[in-house]
Amino acid sequence: MAARPKTLVAAASPVLIGTGLASFQGFFQPLPALMALVGALLIQIATNLANDYYDFVRGADTAERVGPVRVTQAGLLTPEAVRRAIVVVMVSAVLVGSYLVWVGGWPILWVGVLSLVCAVAYTGGPFPLAYHGLGDLFVFVFFGLVAVAGTYWVQARALPPDVLLAGVGVGALSTAILVVNNLRDIATDTRAGKRTLAVRIGRLATAVQYTLLLVVGVAAPVLGVLVYDWPTVTAAAGLVTAVVWVAPLRTVWGHRDPHELVPALGQTARGVALYGILLAVALAWGLPRLH
């Protein structure tokens, strides 16, 4: 429960897409791809555990909070147990990362170190990112650009521009998960002094942000086809997921109570999972380029 399995699609989807793109371009390597997936999941779990722990310690998670149970606030685990779990997961991520550094070299080392630091700094440390409105940027960069680029790099040792386009698409959609979460928590975050971007810009602007993120996610594979000669089916894969966004989009714009956003959060996460799977398959099944 503390690991928040439903959120792990934000870590898995960019790895799947990076691997699909590497396969399309003739660079697929199964073991580096698998280890990149494991490493990404571990970093996501570490971030979730740290979020559970630090939000409780800082008073952001209270009995008034809406949404899934937080194990520390609910008393299911002690703060010390959660803190120990953070250490165990981060050590595991370092072990996996050591292999990826061996495969991908120094760039992966710096990416890994920065990812682990930011996993804790998201809600912990002297300048918690989420408390200063930087959580959205963190998710977009690390669960979009960095995750796709890192996955591609450990297989191809290259970084063509269309890798960043793929990262922009899935990063926007992963950020949309956080946006729904923060929209739901505006009232409790405001009282706790947690100045998320949603708290700073308000409900209307947050709904606009959510909408724009979905548009960017759907548009990215279309641009990939038009500009970078991705398989045509890739654009179709992105457009198909637009159907999934209709229900949560209506809720984000029409909700009157924060509780109504709980289903929208799950629907957004499932949409990101579908997007990652369809896009990865569409890319992997395209004819590989010759090098």
Image (cartoon, rainbow, N blue to C red):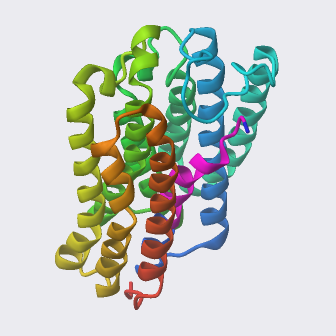
The residue lying furthest to the left in this view is 227
Q: Image quadrant of residue 168? A: bottom left
* 267 in magenta: no
Magenta stretch in the rendered image: 2-16
Q: Is residue 153 visible in this depiction of the protein?
A: no
Q: Quadrant of the N terminus?
A: top right
Q: Is residue 189 above or below residue 284?
A: above
Q: Position of residue 52 (x, y in %)?
A: 64, 25
Q: Is residue 67 visible in this depiction of the protein?
A: yes
Q: Main secondary structure of the magenta part?
A: helix
Q: Is residue 174 above or below residue 192?
A: below
Q: Position of residue 133 (x, y in %)?
A: 34, 23
Q: Position of residue 144 (x, y in %)?
A: 40, 50
The answer to which of 285 and 243 lies nearer the viewer is 243
* 7 in magenta: yes
Q: Image quadrant of residue 241? A: bottom left
Going 45% across and 49% down the picture, which residue do you hit? 264
The answer to which of 179 and 148 lies nearer the viewer is 179
Q: Quadrant of the C terminus?
A: bottom left
Going 44% across and 17% down the picture, which residue do you hit? 189
Q: Position of residue 196 (x, y in %)?
A: 37, 22
Going 31% across and 52% down the picture, which residue do you hit? 250
Q: In this image, 276 relative to 204: left or right?
A: right
Going 28% across and 60% down the picture, which residue do you hit? 165
Q: Is residue 230 above or below residue 133?
A: below
The answer to which of 145 and 181 lies nearer the viewer is 181
Q: Image quadrant of residue 239? A: bottom left
The answer to which of 178 and 18 lies nearer the viewer is 178
Q: What is the total number of numbered labels drawn onto the structure image?
A: 0
